[in-house]
Amino acid sequence: MKKSVLTRYRVMAYTTGVLLVLLCLSMIAKYGLDVDGAADFTRVVAIAHGWLYVVYLIFAFDLGSKAKWPVGKQLWVLLAGTIPTAAFFVERRISHELEAEAADRAPAVAEA
């Protein structure tokens, strides 16, 4: 698997995670604190998160299919973009896992 597949997943995981946290904070400002301008900010962040989440789904599915993950793991990674802050933790775990697998394969390739 190419490193670029993991890199683009990581970028979208962070982007989706940040937008989801911003969306949660803006909704608190809009509904809980009744802050002026929060409605417009919430609308913009919600639209951006919605569209970029679709891109995240595509990249996460591509990564999972190339890594040959079981369906349960694939679903967890796909849903991580809908739970505030989960994308950060799932991305870190997946990155460490895939980088360790790549490091394990590297000596085998070098010996051949």
Image (tube, grey):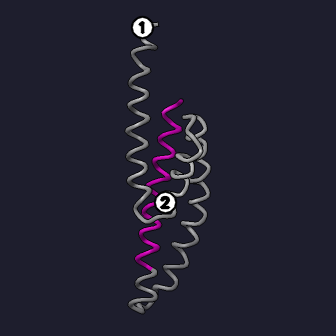
Residue at the top extreme of this rendering: 112
Q: Is residue 67 above or below residue 81?
A: above
Estimate the x, y position of residue 11 in percent, counting from the top left. 46, 50
CA separation, marks 1 and 2?
Answer: 40 Å
Q: Is residue 21 above or below residue 70?
A: below
Q: Secondary structure at mark 2?
A: helix
User: Which image quarter: residue 68?
Assistant: top right
Is 8 colored magenta in this rendering? yes
- Front-most of 104 and 75? 75
Labelled pair 1, 2 in contact (Cβ < 8 Å): no
Whichever of callouts 1 and 2 sits on the residue coming sooner in the sequence is 2
Residue at 59% over, 66% down: 50
How many numbered circles are shown? Answer: 2
Is 46 on the left-hand or right-hand side of 94? right
Specify the amino acid type for callout 1. Glu
How busy is the neighbourhood of tag 1: few (under 14 within 10 Å), some, or many (20 plus)? Answer: few
Estimate the x, y position of residue 76 in percent, counting from the top left. 52, 52
Estimate the x, y position of residue 30 in percent, counting from the top left. 45, 87
Q: Which residues are magenta?
A: 1-26
How busy is the neighbourhood of tag 2: few (under 14 within 10 Å), some, or many (20 plus)? Answer: many
Residue at 44% over, 75% down: 24
Q: Which residue is mark 1?
A: 111
Q: Which residue is mark 2?
A: 16
Estimate the x, y position of residue 8 in percent, counting from the top left. 51, 44
Q: Secondary structure at mark 1?
A: helix
Residue at 47% over, 41% down: 7
Is 2 on the left-hand or right-hand side of 96? right
Specify the amino acid type for callout 2. Thr
